[in-house]
Image (tube, rainbow, N blue to C red):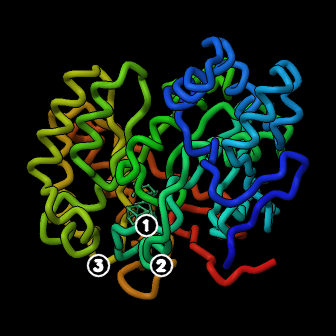
Amino acid sequence: MPPERNADASGVEPGRVSIKGLGPDALADAMRELGEPAYRAGQLRRWLYRDGAVTFDEMTDLPASLRTRLAHRFDLALPRLVERQVSSTDGTRKYLWRLADGVTVESVGIPAASRLTVCFSTQAGCAMGCAFCATGQGGYVRGLEPGEMVDQVRMVGVDFGERVTNAVAMGQGEPFADYDSTLAALRFMNAPDGLGIGARHLTISTCGILSGIERLATEPEQFTLAVSLHSAVQATRDRIMPGVRAQPLTALRETLIAYTHGTGRRVTFEFALIAGVNDTPAELSALVAFCSGLLCHVNLIPVNPVVSTASDRPAEKTVRAFQRALADAGVETSVRVERGADIDAACGQLTQRRSETG
Ligand code: SAH
Ligand code: SF4
């Protein structure tokens, strides 16, 4: 599919750099290169991520000559809404966006009493190939630009007419496979003149990329870390999460101990219980052993049976047994309540739809 450009007054042409590809630092550098004072970068950032400008022309507190130079140099595109589904049971909304080059990604908006959480995608597709995950089974397309991530979150907030209080990188893709873009996006989301979401309310979920966890520990912000564990038995994990075979559980545990010690922050483990795969007593004892002595919280998720193999839900009593055994071992545990089930908006149900046109 040929690249789609927004045919607005700024006259976007091929060959320009996407401004949504720049993180906060690169945006500041670009303004410096244009000979502009530092505060201009802040103005530009506000237009892009607080106000959701569609053209450079509407950035009225920038000098007209600068707006023209920006338009010559940069492409400015917003995701286009292709489809929106609203859950009739709990108000969860699922969005399908088409990006400037025609690639599509999904986001989910999850309303609660005083919260609005947006689950955003960091990549179109995913290369990690997890056996139970619809995204993983669809393969990898490309990483998203920082602005493409921020725009998902901002636009869901606009659709709800509410401030987004929490954002989680739990849509399509592996955030640490695109570390720099993801961190740049979180910084725009966190900035008071961006989306103004508190750092602790911004969560990255990783399948366990060790270098990403190590880097996150050194960042100044208190972003929240979630790790998709899904099995504390190496052979099982190798089978269901082939993308992290080279990053074994022993190393993961050591890295997380260093992370929790270094940051004082707790890590959340996601554990999708799959009948006959990781719901056995042996899996449970391995999980308890893995968690013991680690500052963590375990989120048990009865798997969403979205792929044909290895994804049956366990019996409810199995889920309760896991919960009880973990609690007995002093490990904090919760069981995830499924949201938006009628619109396939739950984890692992976000798929890359490439056949879309128009
Ligand atoms: N790639 C990252 C983040 C996106 S996936 C990661 O893997 O952590 C978001 C969460 O949904 C992860 O915990 C993932 O393991 C989980 N998930 C994927 N497919 C699922 C399914 N079918 N049922 C339940 N959880 C699933
Ligand atoms: Fe990728 Fe996460 Fe799905 Fe695994 S669970 S395939 S890492 S999106």
What's the residue type where badge 2 is placed?
Gly
The residue located at (53%, 29%) in the rendering is 187
Q: Which residue is mark 1?
A: 126
What's the residue type where badge 3 is placed?
Gly
Residue 276 numbered mark, or none: 3
For label 3, count other residues whose C-alpha is less than 10 Å away and answer few (under 14), some (14-19) or many (20+).
Answer: few
Q: Give the number of callouts.
A: 3
Percent position of residue 162, x then y: 81, 34
- Establish if 51 lies above or below 21: above
Which quarter of the rendering shows the C terminus? bottom right
* Most distant residue in the left direction: 250
Q: Which residue is mark 2?
A: 138
Q: Are marks 3 and 2 in contact (CB under 8 Å)?
A: no
Q: From the viewer's perspective, is 85 left or right of 2?
A: right
Residue 96 shows up from this direction: yes
The residue located at (20%, 53%) in the rendering is 287
The residue located at (22%, 75%) in the rendering is 239
Q: Nearer the viewer, residue 200 or 16?
A: 16
